[in-house]
Amino acid sequence: MRKALGRGINALLPAAPLKKPAPPADQLPPSPLPGEDGRDVRRIPLEAIKPSRVQPRKNFDPERLSELSQTIKEHGLAQPIVVSYDAISNTYELIAGERRLRATQLAGLKHIEAVVRTPQNEKERLVLGLIENIQRDDLNAIETALAYRRLMDDHGLNQTQLVGIVGKSKAAVSNTLRLLELPDEIQKAVQFERITEGHARALLMVDDPLERDKLYKLIVENHLSVRDAERSAQRIVGGEPLPEQRDRVKALKAPKPADIKALEAQLEKGFGTRVEIKARKDMKSGRIVIHFYSLDDFDSILKIIKK
């Protein structure tokens, strides 16, 4: 499957020939490095690479980014990023591999290996970026669905044609696209990992918007497993009411002590984000959960902790 997807990329956007304009010699190794499928890989300064204008990836897990950064620092980059070269500005624009680029920056390195391609237009640039991310499983389910939809809209593709490009089964593509039928709030919950793709698919089983919203809140507030969410969805489809069940579950949860709530409020004010204190029954131990909703949030929290 992966090989088929790779062929789809090459068919859509061939690698740039070596005769294309190249950057100054001091930015290149004496000779091109050997790349996958016989492509040439150049060693490029990180400061010469501009962000992609059509990046499909919206969220980056700081913990996974840190792990990748450590791996790159110890073992190097397993697969080069993909860029295009602008001879006028003498800079490169990222096409695919932003997570690898960020991790390399985080590792404190100054150069990165990259395949240089020459997209003929913005659509080709988008195709390559989307397929690269999909191939590497770098996108969450909603980002993948949005990537599929954008490919279809911008290229006038139907699902059958899309299947041939991304190397997935028709059922897999169709099921992923169905996630976009969910309300924005639920889609964002998947993107920010408040619920999983499995939870989202369980919610799709419920056609009634009000009942679906009740189930979504039940999943989030009571941390239901995917299996429990599916069972609840099946009960709703079978005509069994959910509100009473939700009320019973909430009634079992002991209210959080006022002093704990006050401490949470102080921490939230200091960090500028949501903070939860989860104490054990004996109140002698527990954990503090600091929520972040972007890489910038994470960086800000780290700076505060390091002070």
Image: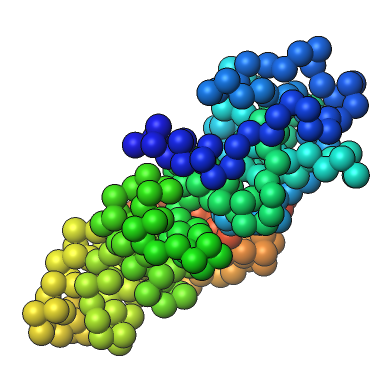
Quarter of the picture holding the C terminus: top right
Q: Position of residue 56 (x, y in %)?
A: 57, 55
Q: Position of residue 51 (x, y in %)?
A: 73, 49
Residue occupying image coordinates x 46% and y 74%? 185
Give left or right: position of 210 versus 68. left
Q: Position of residue 47 (x, y in %)?
A: 83, 37
User: Total label count?
Assistant: 0
Residue occupying image coordinates x 63% and y 33%? 15
Q: Position of residue 156 (x, y in %)?
A: 49, 66
Q: Which is more toward the observer, 156 or 280?
A: 156
In the rendered view, how is the structure colored? Answer: rainbow
Residue 81 visible in rendering: no
Give left or right: position of 275 versus 281. right
Residue 263 found in image quarter: bottom right
* 71 to 261, vertically: above or below: above
Q: Which is more toward the observer, 54 or 191?
A: 54
Give left or right: position of 231 versus 306. left
Quarter of the picture holding the N terminus: top left
Residue 46 found in image quarter: top right
Residue 207 visible in rendering: yes
Residue lying furthest top in this view?
A: 30
Residue occupying image coordinates x 30% and y 61%? 175
Give left or right: position of 121 versus 128. right
* 86 to 191, vertically: above or below: above
Residue occupying image coordinates x 36% and y 61%? 159
Residue 275 found in image quarter: bottom right
